[in-house]
Amino acid sequence: MPASSTSRASDLPVPQDTRFDRRLAEILDYATEVFAEKGYEGASMRDLSRLSGISLAGLYYYFESKEKLLYFIQQHTFTTIIDRLRGRLAGSSDPETRLRMFVHNHVDYSLTRPKAMKVLSHEDDVLKNGYGTELAGIKREYYRICVGLVDDLVKAEGLKSIAAGSSGMKTRTAVMALFGMMNWLYTWYNPRVDPDAEVLARQISDVFLRGIRGVNGSREPNRSPKKAQPKRRS
Amino acid sequence: MPASSTSRASDLPVPQDTRFDRRLAEILDYATEVFAEKGYEGASMRDLSRLSGISLAGLYYYFESKEKLLYFIQQHTFTTIIDRLRGRLAGSSDPETRLRMFVHNHVDYSLTRPKAMKVLSHEDDVLKNGYGTELAGIKREYYRICVGLVDDLVKAEGLKSIAAGSSGMKTRTAVMALFGMMNWLYTWYNPRVDPDAEVLARQISDVFLRGIRGVNGSREPNRSPKKAQPKRRS
DNA sequence: ATAAAATTATAACGAACGTTCGACAGAATC
DNA sequence: GATTCTGTCGAACGTTCGTTATAATTTTAT
């Protein structure tokens, strides 16, 4: 009776690709579909059994609880996104390019695996007390990466503070607005009428970048941070 | 045995403020809290009973099902937002001011009643087939208002098309990005560290407006019905 | 061929779910 | 003072939930 004997919070399907792991991954895909469709609480194990064609008892051969199923999905989705991001970021050192990479990576994943992304976003605060805090940590790490990229950009362009209107916008607020644009995607995106990942990522990046830069660009051609915060009439 | 005898999809607590309606409104507040905390599917009628101090059976004197409870909450939240919006929009005819009013109205409500907003956003596709389609209609109406405001602005400023990067951004995409920034609020906003509604709405508006205007403004030189327009609501 | 690993059907478990029944008390009406 | 209406309740109904046990069988690996 396997089902991954340990109960520590961080045993994920190890890199080693056994037959067991492959089947579990298959089940995780079905579960992602069911959770995306009916929500974690609204979906039943019997729904999953029906969709996957695996008997109710058979499912429990691969995991030990419905909670763990959700944990696997979210953990895997999150780490995949971060891993891909790290791969991309290694390719450039230009702050703007790197931020655009972040957005493109996120948007691309969202459009490629919309259901996984929906489960990640929508069931964000379901898990508590073990898996929950671990996932919160990963999320925090991901958030910090984005903050770092924005801060690098702000420094490189010599902006005293992010400009929005007359008062400076905190990095936190700007980053949350960016996450809002990206994470809301799953509620409206329709591949038949909406632009592909490349275009969408560029447009979102453009909006964000123009947002944090001042009205006239508010930049110094190069060094020396001084001078001219954009001043709307006031 | 009351509980609102009819079963048509649009009987809401009528303007007439009877004792019954007042008690129902009180229950709706408790229900909003429970749904916001545990999600619609995750919350039980017993949770609501416990929180409100009203017996399980007693609750059903005021409504006929859990579904209808959610419908009441979402319907009331939506129409309240739209009503307030109409009131504000009547105060100005300047396109930019009107768009800023839209954002401010939405953000303001989101920060004033975050739980209601969370239930509206998070349980968006739970209801189907009756209440669901009615709510989808209201949502669509709200969306169309926003599209109208953006289109007015684009026309008034003589933008060929919304500019984002080299290719034009569709109004749909821009509006969805705006909704993303606003509707994601409920996942992160913390009144102790984040700016108040006034400031936040201005910053989001600024990001959005700079986003849809070109880098240099991208306006056509032909007409210029632009006046500085001292913003700030009355 | 044989041992091990997967998987099934069946059924059950206790707990929790949404909802309803019938009774009952107080207030309003007659 | 009797009767009706309004609000509230404890207790239960029938169903579904996540999960497990058992025993039998098929599939895979050695």
Image: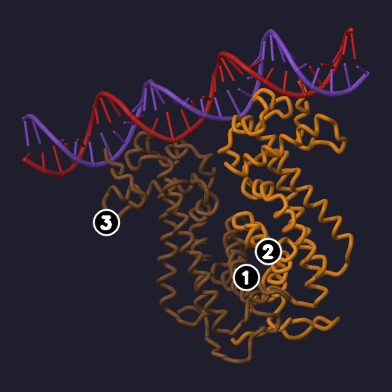
Chain colours: A orange, B brown, C red, D purple
State the SS at label 1. Answer: loop
Indicate the amino acid at tag 2: Pro
Picture quadrant of residue B166: bottom right
User: Along the line of sight, which residue is nearer the eye, A31 or A151?
Assistant: A31
Q: Are marks 2 and 1 on the same chain?
A: no
Disc 2 vs disc 1: Cβ atoms closer than 8 Å? yes
Indicate the amino acid at tag 3: Gln
- Tag shown at residue B170: 1
User: Along the line of sight, which residue is nearer the eye, A40 or B229?
Assistant: A40
Distance from disc 1 to disc 3, alpha carbons, whole Å, reads 44 Å
**Residue A37 point in image, percent of width and height:** 59, 43
Distance from disc 2 to disc 1, alpha carbons, whole Å, reads 9 Å
Q: Residue at x 49, y 63 (%)?
A: B109
Q: Which residue is mark 2?
A: A195
- Tag shown at residue B108: none
Q: Residue at x 80, y 34 (%)?
A: A22
Q: Is residue B211 left or right of residue A106?
A: left
**Residue B92 point in image, percent of width and height:** 45, 80
State the SS at label 3. Answer: loop
Indicate the amino acid at tag 1: Lys
